[in-house]
Every structure is written in structure tokens, then in C-alpha cells.
Image (tube, helix red, strand yellow):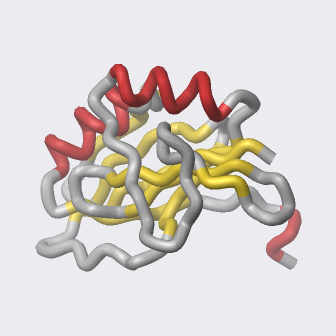
Amino acid sequence: MLKHFRPIAFVATADPSSSREFYERILGLEFISDDQFALVFDLDGTPLRIQVVEKVNPHPYTALGWNVSDIRKEVVELTGRGIQFERYEGMNQDRDGIWRSPSGAQVAWFKDPDGNILSITQL
């Protein structure tokens, strides 16, 4: 079945030029292509299709995330590139916006220009 095939990740944008700037220059993803339907980036071998839509209705939960080896380092670097990390009521996040889950995983959330919630996680 599908377990033998590589996934494709999707998010949406109503402003492709802002999204391209964000994903390519701020997050450092490799840009692959742009057409009337989507921007495409490489996520370490997995395609990310940022679908061009008329209006984005962001979900109130994470749409896309990355597993990182040093979350503190990534938070500092992304903050330096203008990323503002989200704060959530009831979550015991540290000064940098990092939350430690009961399992010990550390997570920090931020938004793309369309309000899609993205995350970085250190397991």
C-alpha cells in the first residue's frame, strides 16, 4: 500500500510572493518551482506544495513541523530572522516559547505569513 511511497506535504497560501519569501529566505528551504497552482519546496527529499488559494483558513493546530536536533539553537536562529514564537495559555513555555511535553519532547510554534501554525520539535 502507501507505506512504500514518499509523502507530499501541503499547506496553503493566498499570497504566494510572501510565502516564497518566508519559506525560502526565512526558513531556508530549497525552492523547486512555482506555477499557478502551487509553490514547491524540498523538505529534505519530501516535496512541500504550498497551494495557492483565494483565502486561507488556518487550522488552530500545527499544520507542518520539523524534528530538530537542538531546539534552542533553532529558536535563536529563527528569532534572529524575524520569527516570533507563539505563546499558548495553559502551556508552561519557557522564555523562548519552548514547551516541554510530559514525554520530554520540546516544542516551539510559529506562524507563516498566512497564519498556518508551524513547529519545531526536539525529541
Residue that appears at 56% across and 28% down: 74
Where is residue 97? Give x, y as percent. 49, 46
30 left or right, relative to 72:
left
Q: Is residue 17 left or right of residue 101?
A: left
Left or right: residue 30 versus residue 74 is left
Q: Residue at x 46, y 21 (%)?
A: 77
Count of marks, rendered view = 0
| Residue 34: quarter of image | top left
Horizontal and vertical percent for residue 56?
A: 22, 73
Q: Is residue 26 visible?
A: yes
Residue 50 rendering spot, x and y as whole percentages? 36, 56
Rendering coords of residue 44 (x, y %): 65, 35
Quarter the N terminus occupies: bottom right
Q: Which residue is at the front of the view, 33 or 10?
A: 10
Report whether residue 47 is seen. no
The residue located at (33%, 36%) in the rendering is 83
Residue displayed at 81% across by 65% down: 102
Quick check: 112 above or below 103? above
The answer to whether 38 appears left or right of 8 in the picture is left
Compare residues 4 and 54 and report the one nearer the observer: 54
User: 37 or 82: which is nearer to us?
Assistant: 82
